[in-house]
Image (tube, rainbow, N blue to C red):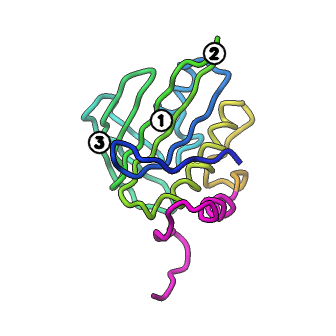
Amino acid sequence: MNRGTFITFDGRPAVQFQRSYAHPVERVWGAVSEPEGLAHWFPSTVRLEPHAGGKIEFSDDPHMYATTGTVLVFEPPHRLAFTWEGDEIHLEVAPEGDSGCRLTLTNVLGAENTAARNAAGWSVCLGELDKHLAGTGAGGPHSESAEPWQPYYDAYVAAGMPSGAEIPGAPQQDA
């Protein structure tokens, strides 16, 4: 399990993931910044205006309603950041080694108790990105072929990552 870590990002709680790929920066950038690439691994369909201050739209996520955010940073082929509900998503692609690159995904959390839930979701999503970049066919994080979310969530909770936020699609607990 390639897990994320709970960090503080600009004084706010966040979960962060790093992945190394034997692909050029431009290939990974396309997968994380263009709607055609995002379609293979991101939990929502994304349409974005490719500039800082632009609008970004999210739809077709079975666990969330359609919503919009704002592009905070758009610096091809290295940095993309945007708002998504009360969170921020930061994607950075940096050269690594002779021909590879490193992707860093940071989810700045609107509420600390969403850390384990979101980290589990990103673990599943990044597994799909890994498959897409490897050319092995990614069906997306909501597909039958995606890794299950629950084992990731359980592992993050067991490791002490902040938890307790509502889990979309799960039965509600009586308080």
- Kindly report which numbered mark, 1 or 3, lies closer to the viewer in this rendering: 3
The residue at which mark 1 appears reads as: 35
Quadrant including the C terminus: bottom left
Q: Nearer the viewer, residue 39 or 103?
A: 103
| Kind of residue indicated by mark 3 | Thr
Query: Which of the 4 quarters of the picture holds residue 28?
Result: top right
Q: Position of residue 127 (x, y in %)?
A: 66, 44
> What residue type is disc 1 on?
Pro
Residue 10 lies, in percent from the top left, at 34, 42
Q: Is residue 22 left or right of residue 64?
A: right
Element assignment for label 2: loop
Q: Which residue has dot 3 on it?
A: 70
Q: Residues within 10 Å of mark 3 (few under 14, many from 20)?
A: many
Q: Nearer the viewer, residue 112 or 84?
A: 112
Q: Is disc 1 placed on a helix, strand or loop?
A: helix
Of marks 3 and 2, which one's residue comes earlier in the chain? 3
* Position of residue 100 measured from the top left corner of the image (x, y, whole percent): 63, 19
